[in-house]
C-alpha cells in the first residue's frame, strides 16, 4: 500500500510528512522546496491480538506498545501542486505522475488561511482553504481526464464484446493509475456508462467517469493542518460545513514533529497519537514555552496533534482496510520462533486465498485450506476475512 501526501506549496505538507515518518525533509517558507518526491514509512494503529492469546508478540515489522500494534505503511510526499498543474504548470504533470501507484491521498490543507493558492504567504486568515480543497481535487480529476483523452482515439474504436471486455480494456489502458478492474467496473456502474459504447461518450461523460474513477481508486482524506494557528479553527469548521461527506481531520504537523523530536532527545515521553506527554528533563525557557503552547493549543483543544488520526482514518475509513494476523501454526510462531510476527493490511472482503497470495505466491498456488486460529475452525479459499483474524495457511510446498 502507498499513501500519497499532496497539497499546494507551503501548506505544511513536508512538515506533516516529516512528522508522520521522521524522515528529514527540506522545510522552508517558499514554494517548491520539495522537487523530488520523498518516501518514508509511517504507522497505523491496530489493537494487537496478543493479549487475547495471553502471549507477548514479537513484530517483524513495526512495533507494539501496551497492546497497540503500529503497522508500517509507505508514504510518498510529492512537490506542491498549483492551479493548472494538470497542464504542466509548476512541473505539475511530473509531480502528478509520482502519484500513479498511490492507493489513497492525504491532502494537507493550510487551515490557517495564511498562504494563497500558489503557496505564497499572505495575511493570516485572508485566504479561504475551501478553495484549496476544490482546486486540488479538480486538478487530480483533470489529470485522470487527460490520461483518458490521450488514449481515447485508440480505445474508443477498439471492438469490445460485453461488459467484461469493456472493463478489461479500460483497466488495461489505465492500469498505471486505477489499481484494479474492480475500480473501473464500479466507476462504470456508478456513472451508468457500462451499457454505452465508448465511441458515443460525450466529453461531460468522460469527465464524470474520470472524476468517479479517481474518487474510487484514489480517495482523498483532508488533513486540516496548522491547527496551532488561531485562524485555523473557524476555517476547519467551515470546511466541515462545506464538505460534510469528506473525511476532514484537524492536525498540526508542526506540533507532532516537535514532540517526536523532543521524545527522540529524551526530553519528553510521547507516543504518536497520544493526548499528552510527560516531561523527563528540565527544559529551558524556550522549550517550556513551545511545549506549553502545544499542550494548550493542540493537545488540550483537539485531543492529539491529529497526525496519527489522519493516518489511521486514511487506511481504515477511506480505504476500508482490515488487519489480519497470519501465523505459521497454532503456537502463533513463525519458523524462527517469533510470536505473531506479522500484521497484514488487507482490503475489505479479502479472502483466505488472497491472503495466501499476499504472503507468498507459493502459498497461494499450493493453497489447501486455512485455519481460523481463534475459533479453531478450518475455512476454505473463499472464506471472507474479518478484521483482526488470526489465520494459519496450510499449503502444499512446491
Image: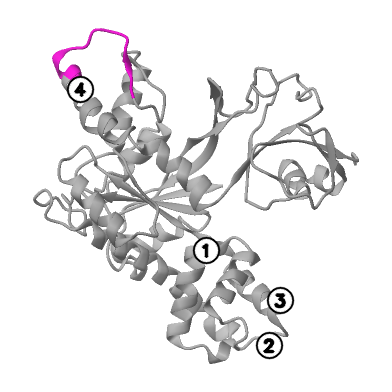
Which region of the structure is painted magenta? 276-288
Q: Which mark is residue 159?
A: 2
Given residues 325 and 121, the one toward you in this image is 325
Residue at screen point 41% across, 24% down: 271
**C-alpha span from label 2 to label 1:** 26 Å
- Point out residue 250 in the picture as x, y percentages from the top left corner: 31, 43
Is 3 left or right of 252, judged from the image as shown? right
**C-alpha span from label 1 to label 4:** 42 Å
N-term-proximal mark, 2 vs 4? 2
Mark yes or no: residue 102 visible.
no
Q: On screen, 214 above or below 276? A: below
Where is mark 4, residue-wise?
292
**C-alpha span from label 1 to label 3:** 19 Å
N-term-proximal mark, 3 vs 4? 3
Residue at screen point 55% across, 71% down: 187
Where is mark 3, residue-wise?
164
Q: Nearer the viewer, mark 2 or mark 1?
A: 1
- SS at mark 3 in the image: helix
**C-alpha span from label 3 to label 4:** 59 Å
**C-alpha span from label 2 to label 3:** 12 Å
For mark 1, does the 10 Å Cα neighbourhood hold few (<14), some (14 to 19), or many (20 or more) residues?
many
- Point out residue 209 in the picture as x, y percentages from the top left corner: 50, 76
- SS at mark 2 in the image: loop
Mark yes or no: residue 177 visible.
yes
- SS at mark 1 in the image: helix
Q: Are marks 1 and 3 in contact (CB under 8 Å)?
A: no
- Within the magenta stretch, is there residue 279? yes
Where is mark 1, residue-wise?
216
Q: On screen, 165 above or below 102? A: below
- SS at mark 4 in the image: helix
Amino acid at each position: 500500500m502507498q499513501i500519497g501526501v499532496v497539497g499546494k506549496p507551503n501548506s505544511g505538507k513536508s512538515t506533516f510528512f516529516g512528522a508522520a515518518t521522521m524522515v528529514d525533509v527540506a522545510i522552508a517558507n517558499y514554494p517548491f522546496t520539495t522537487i523530488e518526491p520523498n518516501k518514508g514509512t509511517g504507522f497505523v494503529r491496530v489493537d494487537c491480538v496478543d493479549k487475547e492469546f495471553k502471549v507477548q508478540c514479537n513484530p517483524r515489522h513495526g512495533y507494539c506498545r501496551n497492546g497497540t500494534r503500529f503497522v508500517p505503511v509507505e508514504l510518498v510526499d510529492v512537490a506542491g501542486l498549483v492551479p493548472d498543474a494538470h497542464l504542466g504548470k509548476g512541473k505539475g504533470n511530473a509531480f502528478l505522475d509520482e502519484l500513479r501507484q498511490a492507493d489513497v491521498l492525504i491532502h494537507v490543507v493550510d487551515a490557517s488561511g495564511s498562504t494563497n493558492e500558489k503557496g505564497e504567504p499572505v495575511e493570516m486568515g485572508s485566504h479561504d482553504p475551501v478553495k484549496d480543497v476544490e482546486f486540488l481535487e479538480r486538478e487530480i480529476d483533470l489529470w485522470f481526464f487527460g490520461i483518458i483523452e490521450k488514449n481515447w482515439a485508440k480505445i474508443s474504436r477498439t471492438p469490445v464484446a460485453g461488459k467484461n471486455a469493456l472493463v478489461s480494456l479500460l483497466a488495461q489502458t489505465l492500469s498505471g493509475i486505477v489499481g484494479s478492474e474492480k475500480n473501473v467496473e464500479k466507476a462504470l456502474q456508478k456513472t451508468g456508462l457500462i451499457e454505452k459504447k465508448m465511441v458515443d461518450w460525450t466529453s461531460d461523460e468522460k469527465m464524470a467517469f474520470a472524476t468517479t474513477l479517481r474518487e474510487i481508486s484514489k480517495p482523498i482524506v483532508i488533513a486540516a493542518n496548522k491547527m496551532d494557528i488561531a485562524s485555523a479553527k473557524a476555517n476547519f469548521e467551515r470546511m466541515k460545513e462545506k464538505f460534510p461527506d469528506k473525511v476532514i481531520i484537524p492536525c498540526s504537523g508542526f506540533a507532532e514533529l516537535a514532540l517526536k523530536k523532543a521524545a527522540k532527545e529524551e526530553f519528553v515521553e510521547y507516543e504518536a497519537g497520544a493526548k499528552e506527554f510527560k516531561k523527563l528533563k528540565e527544559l529551558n525557557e524556550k522549550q517550556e514555552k513551545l511545549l506549553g503552547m502545544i499542550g494548550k493549543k493542540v493537545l488540550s483543544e483537539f485531543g492529539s496533534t491529529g497526525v496519527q488520526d489522519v493516518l489511521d482514518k486514511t487506511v481504515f475509513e477511506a480505504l476500508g482496510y482490515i488487519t489480519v494476523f497470519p501465523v505459521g501454526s497454532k503456537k502463533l510462531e513463525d519458523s524462527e520462533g517469533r510470536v505473531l510476527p506479522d500484521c497484514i493490511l488487507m482490503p475489505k472482503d479479502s479472502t483466505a486465498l488472497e491472503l495466501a497470495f499476499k504472503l507468498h505466491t507459493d502459498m497461494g498456488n499450493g493453497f489447501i485450506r486455512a485455519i481460523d486460529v481463534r475459533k479453531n475452525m478450518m475455512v476454505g479459499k473463499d472464506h471472507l476475512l474479518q478484521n483482526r483474524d488470526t489465520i494459519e495457511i496450510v499449503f502444499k510446498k512446491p
